Amino acid sequence: MLKKFLYVFMISGILSQSCIKGPVCAYEDKNVAASTAEINYLQNYLSTNNITNVTQHSSGVFYTISNAGSGNTPNLCSNLIVNYNAFVLGAAAPFDSNNSTEGIKFILGQLIVGVQKTLPLVKDGGTITLYIPPSLAYGSNSQQDQNGNVILPANSYLKFVFTILGVG
């Protein structure tokens, strides 16, 4: 009888510990960085356009933090609510955006590497501008809309402006 009790007690303990840990994160940090040529291109663009107060991340993404935020810091498995504008570098109009009051939801690990690496530099409520080289964006893959029209050419340098509305 005592053996059965100890067996049930041990199984209960193991099961309760697995419930405490929560879901396993399926996203991993990608150890990639922009090439020297891509970094030089971005430095030249920023200099030519008098964009100052920009910091270079170790991955090769350049960024400016407008508002650091004060809430939770996102990680790759965070459920985020954001507003954003996405531009091909140098374009006046965004190729994609969301600026609704409720924002748009996604998991950070589902986004391009340049965003994954730099969005955690701000917290909930923060705003950051990113300048991303092609190797940390979509690379040699063009992006198309639902009708098959190219909205983002291959090897595009991108600019994103993100505001984090919530981190979960």
Image (spheres, rainbow, N blue to C red):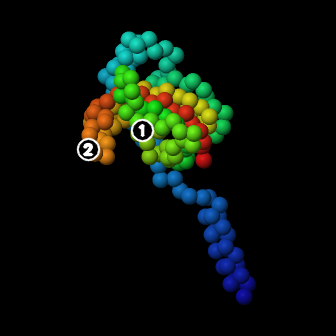
Q: Residue furthest bottom?
A: 1
* x and y, in percent, of residue 168 in the image: 60, 47
Secondary element at image label 2: loop
Q: How far apart are marks 2 and 1 (CA)?
A: 24 Å
Whether 1 is drawn above or below 163: the answer is below
Left or right: 152, with 130 as reference point: left
Instruction: Tell which of 43 and 130 is nearer to you.
Output: 130
The disc at residue 113 is 1
Task: Indicate the quadrant where residue 30 lies.
Answer: top left
Whether 75 is drawn above or below 7: the answer is above
Near mark 2 (Cα within 10 A), the count class, few <14, some 14-19 or many ≥20, is few
The disc at residue 54 is none
Which residue was labeled with disc 2?
148
* x and y, in percent, of residue 3 in the image: 69, 83
Left or right: 67, with 157 as reference point: right
Residue at 31% x, 34% y is 152
For the residue marked with disc 1, what is the amino acid? Val
Whether 74 is drawn above or below 134: the answer is below
Q: Residue furthest right?
A: 2
Whether 146 is drawn above or below 153: the answer is below
